[in-house]
Image (cartoon, helix red, strand yellow):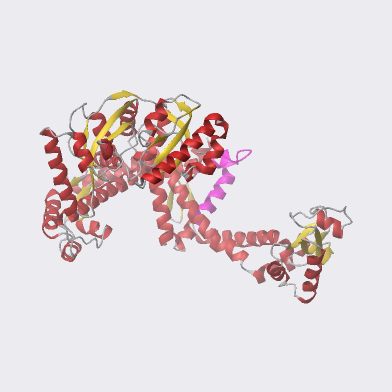
Amino acid sequence: MNKKFVMASGLGLAALALMAKDPIIMTVNGVDVPKSEFEYLYGKNSQQQLSQQPIDEYVEMFKLYKMKVEDAKAAGIDTTAAFLKEISQYRRDLASPYLADSVYMNKLLDEMYDRSLEEVEARHIMLFKGQSVAENAKKRERIDSIRGALLAGADFAELAKNLSEDRGSNANGGSMGYISVQQYPYSFELAAYNTPEGKISEVVESPVGYHILLGGKHRPASGKVQAAHILKMANDGNPETDLKAKATIDSIYNIVKANPAEFADIATRLSDDKGSARQGGMLPYFGRGEMVQPFDSLAFAMEDNTISEPFKTRFGWHIINKISKRPHPSKEQMKPHFMQRITSPQDERFELLRDNQTKRLAATHKAKVNDKALGSIREYISTNGLDSVFYLNYSGKDGNITLFTIDGNAVPVKDIIKAYPDFKQPDVAAALDLFNSHFDAFYNSKLVDAEIDRLEREEPDYRNLYHEYVDGSLLYEISVKKIWDKAAKDTEGLKQYFADHRENYRWSEPHAKGYLVQAANDSIADEIRKLAATAGSDSIVNKVRKAFSGKASIEKVLVEKGANAMVDNLLFNGPETKPAKKGMEKYFMIEPRVIHEPEEYTDVRGLVTSDYQNEFQNAWEEELKKKYPVKVNQKVLKSVKK
């Protein structure tokens, strides 16, 4: 038997099987609507009604809904750049829960929580990363030589004092005190927790630098502390500054020791830490390693509701008011912050999640990278960097070479060039890092696209929500164009509609019309009356607001009797009242009139506009019924009714 025929037959059987599971309930303008989509929207509509809408009635409404969607497509709304961008973003956002590997994420969470039960003593020597690949290569060589010296017996504390670029710890021989999880980059945290006490770690590369760690002691987690402090700065290395700060902090200590209740007020007035001073010296809850030493150790050692004696850090002289200690949080309490952190591209675990996702989706979609083509690209970059010739070749004659396949579909090299154009980089090492980063992101993105396509085909919940959003967006845009804006902006049409249907707009109560003024005093009120006598109605509001800003207010009003106490007093014999605006003593009206029915369409603009829009709506729907054929599968509809 012909192989192509067998394959085609298989595809046909698969399509028939899918149709059997989800038959077509109607076809609108040649577009099939599956039963599942109709049932989903009918069920959602029923939940929003006080009583369930008869299905035959809903069918007619649904047909119009789909016709309007088709009209939006005919108008090209679904091809605009803004619409495509919005829908693409929603499509990915909607897929996020399906794309997440909860098992892998929970594994990372469990590992983090297990580490969080302990604190570890951290000591390190650090060199900050530079601005170029060449500079970083030299930094790496230097940190490797430092590690070699440590392994040969050099004193860690001595090298940290002399060579470490971390000013927060080098003076202490590299000691950072005890730290806990989620305070430092993931790579640093792992090394701190996993390096045995007294042992030298491998060189650790974090986003900010290169580190060597000396393994430290472990102890149970201390929880978090809330404390307030007062600081007098003394960090310029000047002995006179230090003596002055010490004298000031000593005098402050004598006051707060005698009357602890004054701590917050004194911190607000006298602390040099302006951020916490605004909160009475109060700091957010902090854990081990989050504060400079010896602030950190002292705060955790103090009893609750006690005040420390003055002590010095590298910033200056402090007094701590220990408020309370919070016990270690549960895993569930830590989870929201953890999830927020690891899903941020700035966190090193973000790449772990992406790589795990890539591996998982590659297996699902039988993806295969063309290692030969990828190796050739990398070889060129390793020799020439990312130059104009690279982009010329791989967007031109070599652009059709397959980079990888997904579900049997080839993705050519030129597609990655289109996605990341004109990234020129002459430094070959930097260029290779840049390309590798782009490739990983591009490959993952294409796999995600393939998975989202699968979700739309095979996951009814996803498909229904996605199609509902797409169709709803199209319906909104075409309604704005065909009805809402068309009616609201047709001033002459609104005037004529009001004139032709004046009898539909009657009031049960008389209305007051004019300009309501509230003034600061009698003299301001008199000046406004003089201005109103010469200014036209069209300009009076702007002129009063400009001339009497802060001294008076004016607004055009049309209110029925009983709706406004000031207007009632002025025109409907209501009791005296006070101006509604603060600081105003007088109120009066300019051009006041009592009318018993609307004079012009603007007096009932909302009602007239709504009715006028309904006329457009009815005319549009009649046009749609003639324009777009609909065929309902009565047999499938009958199964829904059952």
Which SS does the magenta portion mostly show? helix
Q: Position of residue 166 (x, y in %)?
A: 27, 43
The image quarter in which residue 326 lies:
top left
The residue located at (20%, 54%) in the rendering is 435
Residue reaching furthest to the bottom: 534
Above or below — where is 439 with respect to 400? above
Q: How many marks?
A: 0
The residue located at (82%, 65%) in the rendering is 592
The magenta region covers 41-68
Please indicate whether residue 217 sits to the left or right of residue 628 in the image: left
Give the quarter of the figure containing the N terminus: top left
Above or below — where is 298 with respect to 634? above
Residue reaching furthest to the right: 573
Name the foreground residue: 425 vs 147: 147
Please indicate whether residue 338 sits to the left or right of residue 432 in the image: right
**Res. 157 visible in picture:** yes
Q: Position of residue 245 (x, y in %)?
A: 43, 42
Q: Is residue 533 magenta?
A: no
Q: Position of residue 338 (x, y in %)?
A: 37, 35
Q: Position of residue 345 (x, y in %)?
A: 33, 45
Name the foreground residue: 540 vs 498: 540
The image quarter in which residue 502 lies:
bottom right
Name the foreground residue: 544 vs 376: 544
Above or below — where is 416 with respect to 39? below
Q: Is residue 47 magenta?
A: yes
**Res. 20 visible in picture:** no
Name the foreground residue: 432 vs 353: 432
The residue located at (70%, 62%) in the rendering is 550
